[in-house]
Amino acid sequence: MSDVTHTVDVSTTYLGLRLCSPIVASPSPLTGDPGFWEEIEQAGAGAIVLPSLFEEQIERESFGIDATLNFGTDSFAESLSYLPELDDYDVGVARHLGLVELAREQLAIPVIASLNGTSPGGWVKYARNLEDAGAQAIELNVYDVIVDPRVSAADVEKRYLELVEEVRAEVKVPLAVKLGPWFTSLGHFALALQEAGVDGLVLFNRLYQPDIDLETLDVTPRLQLSTSAESRLPLHWIGILRGFMSCSLAATTGVHDGADAMKLLLAGADVVMTTSAVLLHGPQRIASMLAEMSEWMTARDYSGVDQLRGSVSRRSVPDPEVYQRANYYQVIHSWRG
Ligand SMILES: Cc1cc2nc3c(=O)[nH]c(=O)nc-3n(C[C@H](O)[C@H](O)[C@H](O)COP(=O)(O)O)c2cc1C
């Protein structure tokens, strides 16, 4: 556990697990490298999410994760020293389960495993394997880009719900679902997921968008790390969902400093997750985020995270319209050139 002390209580509850801090190290090559685990824990992470076990691995199909990771990392020179060898990242199923076991042995903070797939099928049994390997919770990453126009939104939601139900039937540990932001009625689907038995939602998956190389005309996957501004999307939706969801809510994408984290907790997140900031600055970034948050809370006499969570959610603010359409009108009319 971290030996950093805080003047306020930064502990929180996520997926029924009591965590020493609300900052969770989300999946990345760093969380998949045992060489960084101690530093992540010492910096004060409340939990660690290991890189996903990919459906592609399970089906033994080729998958270009290495190629994807190779693109763009050179534009983040600072991050390179934190990126382990990519071969280490592309682990097979057995090795992945070994990683979960090792993480449980070496870490005192909860270890969350991640499954990354797009369709229900035989791979669901690996959820049980991850649990058997010691994962204290499982995050189901339903990363998907629907390119077939014959597939409706209802079809997609039905498939995801079936997938969740199948995995739910396989495991006893808490289950979270990591979603992309583009659902026509996210609140409706979020409630359906909760009814299907998920213990938490991780909002939002950051979908990697292709780029076009103007010299070669190749369509290139380009991995760009996030910026703080991107945390406004999870902030918006967590602020809305907190009012009617009883399951845990984790904010992911764009958490780069203590201010980003504080805003998401105030909107109603139980935890915030961070990857890009840790890749850019190293695990110590978690400690500086926590220090910044403690200072902010102390200056305002908050006793801790539990006291302030959700106090600026849509349900709690005097004018809920700020989370809705009326805000659109106000914002575009606030421009002064
Ligand atoms: C190099 C890299 C590898 C990642 N690997 C995974 C993964 O295995 N599983 C997963 O769910 N998300 C993965 N992600 C996504 C992150 O966990 C996170 O959701 C995303 O980067 C947005 O958070 P951020 O703004 O803090 O970076 C990866 C991201 C990066 C940059």
Image: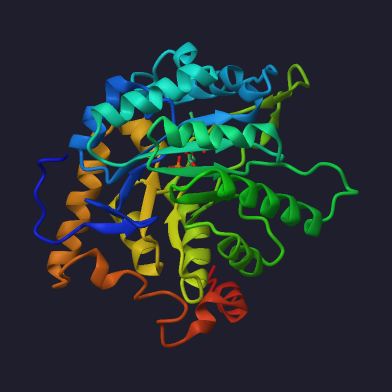
Along the horizontal axis of the image, is 290 left or right of 79? left
Image location of residue 234, percent across then percent down: 50, 58
Q: Which residue is drawn at 62% across and 50% down?
A: 164
What residue sits 54% from the left and 67% below the top? 337
Going 34% across and 76% down the picture, which residue do you hit?
311
111 and 252: which one is in front?
A: 111
Which residue is rendered at x = 16% and y = 39% of the image? Answer: 1
Residue 219 visible from this viewpoint: yes
Judge whether residue 32 can be spotted in this image: no
Residue 154 place in picture, x, y as percent: 79, 59
In this rendering, the answer to whether 151 lies above or below 95 is below
Q: Nearer the viewer, residue 30 or 102?
A: 102
User: Residue 257, relative to residue 235: is it above or below?
Assistant: above
Say left or right for 225 vs 105. Answer: right
Q: Where is residue 243 in the image (x, y as percent from the top left)?
A: 47, 76
Q: Residue extending furthest bottom?
A: 318
Residue placed farthest to the right in the image?
A: 150
Apparent side of residue 148 relative to residue 20 in the rendered image (left or right): right
Task: Give the x, y percent position of residue 90.
Answer: 52, 17
Of 247 and 238, which appears nearest the observer? 247
Drawn side of residue 186 relative to residue 41, left or right: right
Kindly indicate the quadrant of the structure image that contains residue 332. bottom right
